[in-house]
Image (tube, helix red, strand yellow):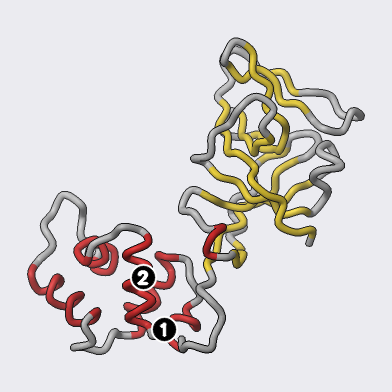
Amino acid sequence: MDSIEIIKSLLEKEKMKNTDLARILFDIPKNEAVPAKYRVRISDYLNGKANIPIEILKKIANYFNIDFNYLINSNDNVMPLTRFLPIIGEASCGVPTHQFFEDREMYPVSEDMYRNSRYIVRAVGNSMLPKIKQGDLVLCDTEAQVDNNSIIHYTINGEESGIKKAVYKDGKLFMLMPLNPDYPPIMLGENDEVVTAKCIKVISDL
């Protein structure tokens, strides 16, 4: 599979058109028509009529979160597409701590694990033992449905961040429960703003 085939497969998987790719590569706002010269340029790239510049390939790799080296050195004998998800920081499994989202380390995941709605947090503390321990990397999904007793990554009022079990009452999230009985639950106030993402998988314990 060469670079052009990879790009075409990515567009097909994400249900994107050539014009969508042109907007990304040439910074064209959604409310503006894609100029003909850019439509032709993308068509020439994908039909092999023009070489794709390295800077364009870098933009494509960054947007789709794939390994740039794989994109430019691909052949039939290399490993399948590798995607990358951001490790956005630390999530407390104990006393909630402030978010540390400035850490943008990227972690490779398989194609089937990748979604645009997913990210990774590094667990800190022992309140979610035995399921999640100190240092575990936890895959989270902002679009997965959160139900009663789902394990979630949460932020409270944009400041406190952690991992707990969601407890609902009358259809409303009202308590964040640890799995470790040595830790107390967190009771949510009426005016607390809570943002949640469902914890899908414990990836590793680095």
For the point 59% across and 64% down, the residue is: 109
- Asked if the residue at tag 2 contacts the one at tag 1, i.e. Cβ–Cβ closer than 8 Å, the answer is yes
Q: Amino acid at mark 1?
A: Met
Where, quadrant-wise, is the C terminus in this rendering? bottom right
Q: Is residue 186 left or right of residue 101?
A: right
Q: Please provide percent x and percent y for residue 119.
A: 57, 52
For residue 132, the mark is none
**Residue at which label 2 appears:** 9
* Residue 51 sits above or below residue 104 on the image: below
Where, quadrant-wise, is the N terminus in this rendering? bottom left
Q: Amino acid at mark 2?
A: Ser
User: Secondary structure beneath disc 2?
Assistant: helix
* Residue 154 sits above or below residue 3 on the image: above
Q: Residues within 10 Å of mark 1 (few under 14, many from 20)?
A: some
Q: Please provide percent x and percent y for residue 151.
A: 69, 35
Q: Which residue is nearer to you in this view: 80 or 178?
A: 80
For the point 63% across and 50% down, the residue is: 139
Q: Residue furthest left?
A: 36
* Residue 195 sits above or below residue 188 on the image: below
Q: Residue furthest right?
A: 182
For the point 53% across and 76% down, the residue is: 80
* Residue 150 sits above or below residue 61 on the image: above
**Residue 156 figure quarter:** top right
Q: Residue furthest front?
A: 76
For residue 1, the mark is 1
Q: Please provide percent x and percent y for residue 128.
A: 81, 38
Q: Is residue 124 left or right of residue 39?
A: right
Distance between mark 1 and mark 2 Cα atoms: 10 Å
User: Secondary structure beneath disc 1?
Assistant: loop
